[in-house]
Image (cartoon, helix red, strand yellow):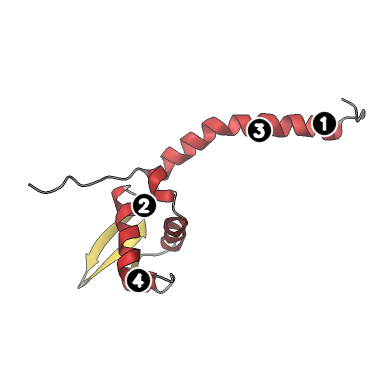
Amino acid sequence: MGEPQVKHDVFQAIADPTRRKLLKLLADKEMPVTMISGHFPMSRTAVSKHLRILSEAGLVKERRVGRENRYRLDPEPLVELKRWYAYFERFWENKMAALQLLVESDDPEE
């Protein structure tokens, strides 16, 4: 019996700066791992491991073309991040509104 495959969620996948760079790189075009590897100071094996994590999180899709796998961004799972961020954004907006009131105040002691 094989080991169960570990699945990564979107938050785990984007926690690494290299994977965030991979997502940006793949946002505009589909690329094979050989071409992707040229953008990073690491081995092709290391890049493949990052791509596997992104793929497990559903952020990257791959398709076979001839003898190579090509990768592209699948932005759909990023909706989960947007929802999470939107919930907490209200706290940031409240702080910005308070700062704006303070800055625009006529009385510096308020």
Residue receiving disc 2: 74
* Dot 2: element: loop
Which badge, 3 or 1, comes first in the chain's sequence?
Answer: 3
Which of the two discs, 4 and 2, sits closer to the camera? 4
Residue at (36% x, 65% y) in the render? 30
Q: Sort mark 2 into few (<14), some (14-19) or many (20+) by Cα contacts within 10 Å.
A: some
Report the Cα–Cα distance between label 1 and label 4. Answer: 52 Å
Q: Earlier in the sequence, mark 4 or mark 3?
A: 4
Circle 1 SS class: helix
What is the spatial separation of the Cα atoms under label 4 and label 2, in whole angstroms?
24 Å
Q: Measuring 32% from the left and 45% from the top, which residue is drawn there?
A: 8
What residue sits right under mark 3 in the picture?
Answer: 93
Instruction: Provide the secondary structure element on which disc 4 rests.
Output: loop
Question: In this view of the protein, can residue 11 be seen by the observer?
Answer: yes
Provide the residue designation for mark 4. 43
Q: CA distance from mark 2 to mark 1?
A: 43 Å
Measuring from the top left, give residue 56's x and y in whole percent: 29, 49
Instruction: Name which residue type carries label 1.
Output: Leu
Nearest to N terminus: mark 4 or mark 2: 4
Instruction: Specify which label sits upstream in the sequence, 2 or 1.
Output: 2
Q: Are marks 4 and 2 in contact (CB under 8 Å)?
A: no
Q: Is residue 90 above or below residue 14?
A: above
- Residue 58 locus on image (x, y percent): 32, 48
Q: Which residue is mark 1?
A: 102
Compute the Cα span from label 4 to label 3.
42 Å
